[in-house]
Structure formats: C-alpha cells, structure tokens
Image (tube, rainbow, N blue to C red):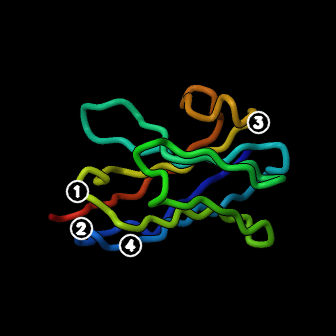
Amino acid sequence: QVHLVESGGGLVQAGGSLRLSCVASGQTLSSHTMAWFRQVPGNEREFVAAITWIGSDTYYADSVKGRFAISTDNMKDTVYLQMNSLRPDDTAVYYCAAGPIYLSGAVYPNEYKYWGQGTQVTVSS
C-alpha cells in the first residue's frame, strides 16, 4: 500500500510560480511511475506530467511543456511539480498519482493504483 499526500497549492497571480509537493509513504516506489494530474469540476482528470522513480525519465502534456518541471527527491520520498508562468487555465485541483506502469502509459489515469487527496491551485488574471 502507498499513501500520497500533496501540498503547496494556493492562490497566485498569472505569471507567477508555485511548487507542489507529494510525499509518499508505504511500500517502495522503485518500480513506479509518479505523475501529476489536474481536474476542473465537470471535466475529466487531465494528465500534466510524469516521472519514473528510477532513472527520472519525464513526460509532459503539451499544455505545460516548458513551463512545468517534475522531479523527485528519493531521499525524501517526495515528488515535486514546479509550475512557472502560470495561467488562469492552469486553475484546477492537482493530484499526485503512483503506479507500477511504464512511462508510455503515463497519460491514462486508470493505469495508476494510488492517488493523493488533491491540492487546489487557483491562478487569477
């Protein structure tokens, strides 16, 4: 079993930055892919970024490429999402996810076994 806890969300003006954190506990994540998704009420959960726990290969949605960066700190069992140049359409609840999957399947939320409770990010114009 893996327990994920996100933090770091908040209110920021357009053009600003936030860093989200996701602390993992429980079983080892060495064979897992970690990801961030986001969801706006009434919409489906949207893939944002993913990273392999071992090797740190990354993959990004086109909408965030060049603005967001996903990284891990294996010593702290933590995954980060650095978000720069934020836009109002980045407003959503952001979720951390983990699953024993290949990066090629990272964009599909149903592939992930574990989810955090989410953290709200609001970008004002």
Q: Amino acid at mark 1?
A: Pro
Residue shown at the point (23%, 71%) measured from the top left? 13
Give the x, y percent position of residue 22. Answer: 58, 61
SS label for mark 1 = helix
Q: Determine which residue is flagged by label 3.
A: 100
Q: Marks 2 and 4, how far apart in space?
A: 9 Å
> Which image quadrant is residue 123 in?
bottom left
User: For the residue carrying disc 2, how many other residues have a C-alpha within 10 Å: few (<14), some (14-19), or many (20+)?
Assistant: some
Q: Determine which residue is flagged by label 1.
A: 88
Q: Marks 4 and 3, how far apart in space?
A: 30 Å
Q: Marks 3 and 2, how far apart in space?
A: 35 Å
Q: Earlier in the sequence, mark 1 or mark 2?
A: 2
- The mark lying in front, picked from 4 and 3, is 4
User: For the residue carrying disc 4, how many other residues have a C-alpha within 10 Å: few (<14), some (14-19), or many (20+)?
Assistant: some
Q: Amino acid at mark 3?
A: Pro
Give the camera-side residue of 115 and 20.
20
SS label for mark 3 = loop
User: For the residue carrying disc 1, how many other residues have a C-alpha within 10 Å: few (<14), some (14-19), or many (20+)?
Assistant: some
Residue shown at the point (65%, 62%) measured from the top left? 71
Q: Amino acid at mark 4?
A: Ser
Q: Determine which residue is flagged by label 2.
A: 14
Residue shown at the point (66%, 44%) measured from the top left? 98
Q: Earlier in the sequence, mark 4 or mark 1?
A: 4
